[in-house]
Structure formats: structure tokens, C-alpha cells
Image (cartoon, coloured by chain):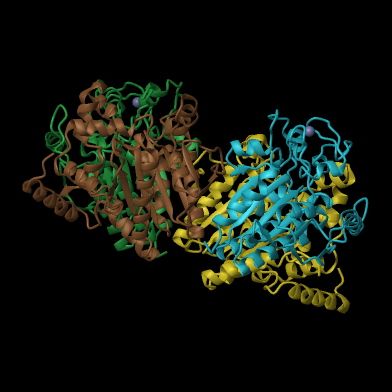
Chain colours: A brown, B yellow, C green, D cyan
Amino acid sequence: MTEGASTQAEQLRLRERLAKLRELPLLRGVGVSGEMARLKRQLERMAVEPSADDVWHSVELARHQDRPYTLDYVERICDDFVELHGDRALADDPAIVAGLGRMDGRTVVLVGHQKGRDIRERTHRNFGMTYPEGYRKAMRAFELADRHGFPVLTLVDTPGAYPGVTAEQHGQGGWIARCQLAMARLGVPSVACVIGEGGSGGAVAIALADRVLMQENAIYSVISPEGCAAILWRDAGEAKKAAAAFKPDAVHCLELGVVDGIVPEPEGGAHADHDGAAALLAESLGAALADVEPIAPDERRRLRRGKFRAMGMYLE
Amino acid sequence: MTEGASTQAEQLRLRERLAKLRELPLLRGVGVSGEMARLKRQLERMAVEPSADDVWHSVELARHQDRPYTLDYVERICDDFVELHGDRALADDPAIVAGLGRMDGRTVVLVGHQKGRDIRERTHRNFGMTYPEGYRKAMRAFELADRHGFPVLTLVDTPGAYPGVTAEQHGQGGWIARCQLAMARLGVPSVACVIGEGGSGGAVAIALADRVLMQENAIYSVISPEGCAAILWRDAGEAKKAAAAFKPDAVHCLELGVVDGIVPEPEGGAHADHDGAAALLAESLGAALADVEPIAPDERRRLRRGKFRAMGMYLE
Amino acid sequence: MEGRIDVTVENRAAERPEGDGKRHPNTCPGCHSHYRDDELEPTLRVCPQCGHHFPVRARDRIAQLADRGTFAEEDAGLRSADPLAFFDLRAYTERLAEAEVATGLGDALIAGAASIERRPCELAVMDFAFMGGSMGSTVGEKFARACDRAGGRGVPLVCVTASGGARMQEGILSLMQLPKTVCAVDELHEARCAFISIMSHPTTAGVLASFASLGDVIVSEPGALLAFTGPRVVQQTTREKLPDDFGLAESNARFGHVDAIVPRAELRPYVGRLLAMFSRAA
Amino acid sequence: MEGRIDVTVENRAAERPEGDGKRHPNTCPGCHSHYRDDELEPTLRVCPQCGHHFPVRARDRIAQLADRGTFAEEDAGLRSADPLAFFDLRAYTERLAEAEVATGLGDALIAGAASIERRPCELAVMDFAFMGGSMGSTVGEKFARACDRAGGRGVPLVCVTASGGARMQEGILSLMQLPKTVCAVDELHEARCAFISIMSHPTTAGVLASFASLGDVIVSEPGALLAFTGPRVVQQTTREKLPDDFGLAESNARFGHVDAIVPRAELRPYVGRLLAMFSRAA
Ligand SMILES: [Zn+2]
Ligand SMILES: [Zn+2]
């Protein structure tokens, strides 16, 4: 790949453009990892509008059956992890994992969606699709974090909240809303990272954080490509076309100000190297946390709200 | 009834003894009602240790089928009342009523157990025996009160929390504990009144208040007389004997420092005159509220905890 | 991935308020009576035969709820942008223009100061006729500003929702209206102002999963569909047998999700009583 | 009142940990093996055949959990009063004296400073052998003081419960130990100290309905009965068909009420890990 002066200039322009869009430090994690080659590759990718193929590649990698899931990262990132179970009311939702973790010599509360690797676990984990009980478990963990001053880390990886009869009857919509509100109210710092599929309401329920990161090949979207295609193209087979239109890839999410930084993945994608992916994720989470920890709790909460209040584009 | 000098002296002694037991104003509501005759009658009753018959009379009146229930009081005490429904998770428990009420030109949050008058309503209200969902509804109302600075009033009238399979599975014990904790944390002032049966954990769940009152013929107890008799006397028929032994009547509860004041009832008991009973209750609730409202929230919370922390008798 | 189940906060054409769209909007789905517009106006668009609640357009709703002449609209000039240059079978900009022409509205939510039963409040009302009441950046921003104004004036916010969900043509930015409006409600809470959420038919997906569920008091109209995922999608994706009243207000009440189901004719005095409860002067 | 259903926070003779009391305490209810005390000691009183967890006396539990020699008991002199001069078939004072002689304990809870896996904590342990582990004023006061000491020293509180409920011989004062211990936990929260609640068999009624359920983390031993109302009373009063695992730890875990079921042999390292999580130095 040639790197002429014009590309350099383009990258610079892009960086400036992104920096203007958001007044937050860019590409947290990328710089920290210190790999100039990777930074270049990523900037190149960003300099050019990702093509429909690029976007679809992200969709495929985000859903790759070998992609690391929350617990794969937890066991690599944490020195110790004690999982907490149950919503104290009705159930323990296996599609969400919550617990206390030791990272860099301190305790954090970690919450994440959990998919299953084999058929049996997939079924058990309900493909990472949460019930209201899962959000209540998450909220209980958030409360614990707030009481003890533990930072909150969330890992987002779900096709979406489960669209079943019982889930609806137990208040799926309401608990997605209340889970967000609980995160908005947190006195402690919080960092979310989309590590695979950031599917709609089920994803954003645990992603209202001080910093929201996204892995290079993760997707974050209001609807699945298939769902979008089925509605707008009246043909679920047009998923690739739909994905290209609504742009769920990390670069576009960064450009739109939805995420604060992109977490690099090892060559070929996170599925190719779980350890490498975990190391890069840990670096990025740590850096993002270090970024928001010095801020006073009330001010941090104000900034957090301000950040989400600023999202969207409209004409006045 | 003769009122010789010795009885007078006895009453005085009793008052002093009670005042020492608790450093709270005594007999709130009695004085306010301004009826010297009733005050005398009550003091007389208190001067003499209530007999087994007196205690059993309370048990019978507390359970009297015509005794006013929470909603009977609400419609007489409140200028307007908007009931709130549901725990936002699973159900609306009809054994607990919660809502916003207008009283003396201001808004309060009112929570109370609700029994039914006829067979159909009794079944619907589950005889005033709550499920965990009922305590969650109460907690939601407490939260609303705290957010908006509304004082909390609770009316206690239950045989106890429902001892059923589903109730257990949904965490009966845990929610009784958490409901108490929610009341302990309240920033707003709170007053509870036992208006009928203060049955065990189901009752105390909503009775952790700044001031706890008890109607003259209400009972407040750790176990039903029948239950106690069945265990200790191995004969549920010995209920009267058991009641005399564990003393669930208002006078004993006041003497033991468990309640802060006794709310007088009309001649013959609350069931004989709902309007009269409501007027006396409203006066007492208002006076108790006025007593705790001027205290700063943090200090009030500290005092509330201190009050309950002081309960119990042991040898050191 | 095999057996993918599609889940979404998006509005679906399938979940239109009056079924498949073949029925005339003034033909009652409950009893099949047919009405002229002027016949339904005096009944607040409630079927005189069977009590079915027909949808109400935003301006009509305001006329039904607010004291005459008190509604002062704000942010009327706000319009949706097209951040993704979204084009499916048609361009998003084209759909927007068409919706504006058809409804006379700038987007799916109107907001402004009002008084209801002589109590001042901020009033925000959604209109399903504008692209299925879908929530994009403009709806989110207008709702958030309504929270700010309520907080600033120290009055309650009353909001009537009617929405198929997030507006997928704005992609991820439409999803971000969930946390955005949640944050706005949190700020309203901090200002100690009440939020009365009135869910009308249908209140679903992204709107149900954000501000609509955060009311201090949540009220619904009879028969309204209140569901994160609508019955058709649930049925299609899970093959479960659906209860007859799946997702309806009555089912939501039974499961503890709404404080009251209030028939339209009683809504105004009911809200008036609530505003009195939350009045600061009192 | 007709059809009265009896509900209570009281311990019932019927709900003894080892059934009807006819079985020898060292005969395993799971596999009917019989053991001498010295056979069960090395296994921490867990049946080597089937894994059944026999009850553990308070001092044995402390020996199992705390680092050797670190437990420093406090409030050992506290004794129950007899506020009601309670007399049923026998006097309460007589029952107390008998329990003290039989168990060598002042009441049903022991508390004091300790360290577990070299982490300092406050440790409170209940003993079912003392009047069914029932909670009267002394148990309530000792638990509350343990909260205070934990808060004062800035260390977590670890509490092992085993209780049939409130002690009815103290009447309403025993019920008041519920709000009292709840307030004590609230103060512990305010001091930002952790509370690790370990529920052993049985943790029921008033203890479950107060402090035991308020742990930051709630752990149970396998097979423990954790119920507000025990199976026999539920069966008698409601005539419902009870599930086989009614009220057991495993059922509680399924319904989301406990964070983990930890076999006794793993309890000490598990608590050690939790203490590390909540350690302030870290
Ligand atoms: Zn009709
Ligand atoms: Zn065995």
C-alpha cells in the first residue's frame, strides 16, 4: 500500500475532522499500544470511507463463532474474578455475566453479555439475549460498585434483548430503560466496550458509560442488518446492502461521535488471537478509566450526561 | 370507677416510668384530641397491667371484621388520593396499597396493607398477606417520595407475609429485609401506624419509620397467638393464654419502647365509628409528622436508626 | 450464525396501530362500526359503540389535554438531518419531506409549555402518523429540551407517547436517542420535577425502552400496545403461543408495569389531579 | 376470622435442621451412613459418602473459617433478659439456662475480630444448637455491635447464619431485632464496609427477613434451607404441592437469591478471595 503525501494529508485532515467532531482524545488504546504500524493501518482504513465490503466484513467478524466472549476476556484480563448471580427476585440470567474482578491491583465491577461457544452453552446463554432479570442483575452489580467505589466496566456483545413472551411480560422495555438510568446515576467511573455485536436496546442498556469504546471489528447498531433489510428492502437477503446503508462498523460509529475510541484487534481479528485481543482490550480499558477517574463524581456524572445529550444530528 | 389519690399517684408514676423508658413525647394524639375523659380512661388502663382478658380483647378488636382498613382511612383522611400500581417487574399485589395523597394541603406518599371486607375482596386482597411484589411496590413508592420530598405514611394491618410457594420462590424474606432497608434510608420523614394486626415480618417490613404509632386496640406481634400456642403449648386452642404471655397489645408495646404513641379509638373501638377513628388517626399522624419534619434529613435518618438500634433488652 | 433471532428497537411496518393498513382508519377494529371524522371528534376519537380508542394526532391530543390556548410550542423549527445519507428503496430525505407534507408536522414529537386543568406544565406529544412515531435525533432532542424547560421552570413534564421505536434511517444515532433521553430524564429528576408518562397506542421498542418507562407515574390508555417487541415479531422469531392480550395495556397492568389505565375521557382530569399532587406551591 | 392462615417469623420445632429429631445427629439424612464425631471433623462435618453438609457449631465454624488463633471474641458476657417474664410450659429463663449449659454459649451468636486467609475482618457466627438459633435481643445487639466494630475498624463483616427465626419468648422485642439489625447494616453500608453473608442450614424467618439477606455478597452451603416460611408450614397452611427442592439453596440460586453455593471445603478460600476484593488497602 502506498503512503504518498496525499494520503498523509488525508489522514491528518481526518484526524482533525474527528477531533472536531468530539472533544475527546482520539483512538485511545491505539496510541497506548504503541504499534505504529497498526495505527497507520487503522488511520488508513479510516481515511477511506469503509466500503460496503468493509462494513460487511465487520458484521461477519463481530459474529464470528470463534470471537472471544466476555468470559474469555475476563479470564485473561482479571487476576481474579468472583461472579455474582441472580437478580434477587426471579432468576439468574445466564446471558449476562456480572462480578467482582481484580485488575491492575484494584477491584472493578465487570458486567457483560455472554454468548455460548458450543450449541449447549449457546442455548443456556440464550445466544447472549437478555431477559429483564439480566438487567436487574447488572443493576445490582452497579449498586454494589457505587457503594464501594469500584469502577464499572461493561462488555457489550448481544444480538439484542430477547423478544419472547415472558421477557415482555416481565418488562423488557422498562428494564432496559432503568438499567440505562442506573448507569447515568453512577457516582463511580465507567467504561463500556462493544466487543462483538452491539445489538440495539439490549446493547445500549449497559453502555451508558463515561467512555464507550468499540473493538475494531465490532458492530453497534439500532437493528440487525437482516431485520433492516426485511423491513426496508422487504428481503432479509439484502442484509449486506442494509448494513452498508446504516453503517454499524466502528469507524462510522467513531465518526458519528457514538464511541470515544476504537480498540485495535490482532492481525486478522480478535478470533485469531484471544490473548492478543485481551491484552489490547485491557490496555484500552485501563487508559479510558485513567482518563475519567481523576474527575470528581458529580462533575463526571454531568459530563457523562452531557456526552449522551450531545448525540444526534438535526437541523435548527 | 373511683379515682382516688392513690390512682392519681399511680398514673403519675406510670407516666414518669414511660417517659423514662422512651425520651419521646408520650401519648401523641391523645393530648391533641383534647378529650380528657379518654385520656383518663387510657391512663387508667395503662396504670393497671392489662389483664389476659384485656389483651385478648385487643386481639379480637384488631381482627374485627368491621374494623376500618387502609382504604377506609385513606378516603376519610385524604382530600384526594391517586393509587399507584405494580412493582414494574411481575405483578400488582392487591394486599398492599400505595399512592399519592393530599392531606392538610400537602402531598404525602401513603402505603398500607389492605384486607378485604367481603369474601370476594378478601380473596382478592389475599387477607392482607403480601407477596414480595407488594414490598417492591411499596419500595417504588418510597423512592418516589424521596425524589420529590413527600413525607411517607404507612398503615400496618396484616396477619403476616404470605407463606406460599411462589412467594417464597420470589424471595419473601429478602424483600421484607430490603423494604425495611429502603425505609431506613429515606431522606424524607416517615410515620407508621399499626391500625389492626401488626403481624410479624410482613408488618415490620413497612414499619421502620421515624415515629411508629399504634391504635388503642391494634396488636403488634412476632407471631400470631394461635401460632405461638401451637408451638409452645402444642395446642392452637391456647391462643388466649399465648397472647397473654407475649403481650401484643398497644399498652405493652408502648411500655417496651416499640411504639412511640398510642392513637385513641372512638368509644367501643374503631369498628364502631369509622369517621371518628379516621379523625383521631389523622390528628395523630399529623402531629407525629410535625414532630419529625423540622429535623434535618441526615440527622433524622441518624435518629431513626438510633431509635431502632436501642430496641431490645439484654443483660451486660 | 445458525438460528439467529432478530431483535430490534426499530419500528416495523407490520406493527401499525390499526393492523395491516387495509382497514379504513375510522373503521373500528373492535366492533366494525364506521365513522366520519366529525362523528369521532366529540368522543375524543373513542368508539361510541365499543369504547375502542382510535389513535389521536398530536395536535388533537394537545387540544384534548391542554387548557384552551395555553399551549406554546417550542422548537417547531427543528428538522431531521440525514447523517448517513440513507437510501433504501427511497431516500430518507424524501420520506421526511413526504411525512411533513402529509402530517403538517416537522417531526414525530411536538413540545411546549401548557397548562392542564389550570396547572402549568411542559407538554410533549408524539404523533404516530409521522413515520410511525419513530424516534430519531429530532425527537430525542425535542424531548430532551422539553425536560430542560420543565426543570428550568420547575414544572412537571407530561408526555404522551405513540411510537414504533427508533428511526432506523438514522442508524446508530437513533439508538443513541435512548441513552440521550434517559439522561434528560435523570436531569429532570435532579431538578426535582415530576414526569408523567402517558403511553398511548402503540408505545414500543426504543421509546418504551427509554424515557416512556421512566415516568414517576405511568398511565396508559385502554387497549394500547405497550411492548418492547411487538406480537408479530415475537411470534415469528420464537414460535411461542401468544396470550390474547399480549403486550396490551391490560396485560401490562396485570404484570405491574403501569400505574393506571385511564379512558381518554377521564385523562385530562386525571392528569390534573396528578399535577396538583406534584405542584410545588402546595 | 375464618380461614386464618398463620404466618410468622418464629422458629418452629417442626423445622429442625435434621428433621424430626428422631435421627441421631451424626446419621446422614442423605445416605444413612453413621459417623463418630472424630470421623466428621477432618471433613468439616461433610458426609464423605454423599456430600451432605451436617450442621456446624459456632465455635467449630470459627475454627474452620478463621486463621488459627486470630479470633478475639467480643461481648461474650451479653445475656438475654426476660422482658415479658415469659412462661409457657416452662419459664424462658429456665430454657435459657438450659441452652447455656448444653451449648456452652451465652446466646445463639458469637462475634469478634478475626482474620480469614490473612485478611482482617469482623466475624459473627450463629449456633442453631442454642434455642434453634433464634434471634432475641442479645443476638440482635451482638450482630449490631459487630457491624459497628467492622465499621470502626474499616474491615468487612463476615456473618454465618443458622436460625429458625425470631425468639418468640421475647415477644415483640424479638420482632424488633429485624429493623434493628437492618439499621445496623445500613450503618455498615454508610461506613463503606462490605458485608458477606453466608447462609448455612437453616436460615429462615426473621433472620432471612433481615440482615442475612442484605449481604453485598450472599453465599450459601449446598442443601441449606433458606426460606422465610419453612416447607412444613407452607404445606400445612396453603395445601400447595411443594417442589422437591422447596426453599433449598439450589432453588434459591435458581430464583436469583444467592450469588453462589459454595461447598464447605471451599468456603474459606472463597471468603478469602472476597475479602481481597473488598480490601481497602488494594
Ligand atoms: Zn367500536
Ligand atoms: Zn451421606
Question: In this orientation, which residue lies closer to the viewer: B79 or B123?
Answer: B123
Q: Position of residue B129 (x, y in %)?
A: 66, 43
Tell which residue pokes out farthest to the left in this image. A6
Is residue B207 left or right of B223 when viewed as pictured?
left
Front-most of residues C90 and D276:
D276
Residue C15, position as x, y percentages in the image? 31, 28
The spot of residue B256 in percent (x, y) is 77, 65
Image quadrant occupied by the N terminus of chain A: top left
The answer, for residue C106, to whether it is visible in the render is no
Seen in the image, is C232 located left or right of residue D232?
left
Please tell me which residue is depicted at 45% across the width and 38% down the height of the picture.
A171
Position of residue B33 in the picture relative to residue B217 (left or right):
left
B143, above or below A239, in the image: below
- A119 w.r.t. A148: above or below: above
**Residue A271 vertical placement versus B112 (above, below):** above
Image quarter for ligand 2 equals: top right
C158, C230: nearer the viewer? C230
